[in-house]
Image (cartoon, rainbow, N blue to C red):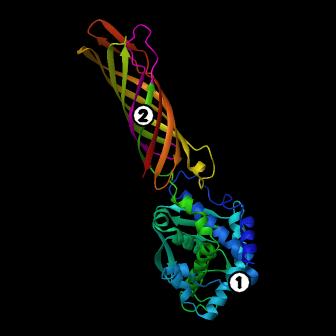
Amino acid sequence: MRLLIFIFGLISAQHVMASTFVGNGGNAGDIEMQITMGQAQKSLAFIDGNKDNYTADLCTCSSQFEGRPVCDILKKLNQEQTRFCARFVSMKAGDLYRLLSEKGNLSVSWTHDQIEVQEEGRLRGADAVTDPKKMTMTLNQKRFLDLDENERLFLFSHELFHLTTYQGKTLSDEGEIGPFKGPDGGRQFINAMAATVVMQANDYGVLREYAAAQKRSKSYKKTYVSVGYAAMTTPNDTTTAFDVNKTTGAQFGVRYQLTPEFGVLGQMSLLRGEKVVMSTINAKEERNVLGLGASYRFFPFANPLTSWGQSHLVLSATVDLLSGTYKYDEQGVGGSAKTSSTGFTVGCNYFIPFDSGLWAYAGASYSTLNYTYNLDNQVDLKYKDNGTTFALGVTYGF
């Protein structure tokens, strides 16, 4: 029987996250909110699929949550309150599931301001507020992100049940409801139902289903620090054999996102190359390139809960400052020359998320730097442009 309910839940929740919340993962909280809404929707689908047997385990604590506050809420219920809670949740689960499934029913938004609600003639601080008439839910973004996964689902589910009615009235935190007595009976009742959604999400594996998305690196972070390997290939100088047309080395960078799309960046490449000229001359070149500029970020895939949905392409344009050193040696006799130049580089890098803030990237860029080495006032070694650079590396976002 439980297997059939599980299959029903998976089928009925296929359209999870259907446009009730607009967020592509580029803003703080987008992913966490989509995960929470998905968890709530699927948990409600399972409850609705089991409504004919609602007294079995609803409004009771799962063993995995022993000692947790969300479990304590349910353990304090007496038998009458447990039955009342179970009956109401099973009756309303289908309605709330459909509310989350259908486009445009519920508007969810963030605020950075403190939320206060009127209760018993005075203001009380809150993490979220719901307006049943306007079908809107507003959550304090910072507080929501500070909560753990279970606490987010509990908070969101609590607000959802404010959209339901009992005896023709929308549920309120104030006053008595059924066997839930006292001035805050409504809050006790709604908390018990919210805790039940969390328990069912755990029992049916909904929380585990989103574990990878929870841990995956998230693109709404503002600062990205990178280290990688770069290989630069320059066109041959046909007028001399002394050119070093391939250099490799380390690449370091930092990017700050001003908005989800636009950012600023700085990058340093420390490149080295060697070449044997005419079988007897050993030539070495060092190129240090500092680039400063702007970037534009693009998300090719729509679903931010997947690895591909978090992956993104970063297009960049920088002003470059190059300092170069060229050395050559033939049987202990040689010389050196230095140069500097300013130019431009355009590039693109694709970022793929790992876990815990780490990313991998690969990309290519093209530089317009041109510069000349004067070797012992005899040979001018000219580079008309730096050509193409390919890079691979890792990034940490925070």
Q: Relative to 356, is 178 on the left or the right?
A: right
Judged from this view, the residue extending furthest toward the left is: 332
Q: Which residues are magenta?
A: 233-261
The tag earlier along the polypeptide, 2 or 1, is: 1
Question: Mark 1: which amino acid?
Answer: Tyr
Q: Relative to 218, is 381 on the left or the right?
A: left
Question: Mark 2: which amino acid?
Answer: Gly
Mark 2 crowdedness (10 Å alpha carbons): few <14, some 14-19, many ≥20: some
Q: Is residue 38 magenta?
A: no
Among the 4 quarters of the image, the one containing residue 138: bottom right
Camera sees residue 133: no
196 relative to 218, above or below: below
Among the 4 quarters of the image, the one containing residue 245: top left
For disc 2, the marked residue is: 293
* Residue 175: x %, y % from top left: 57, 87
Camera sees residue 1: yes
Among the 4 quarters of the image, the one containing residue 318: top left
* Residue 237: x %, y % from top left: 43, 12
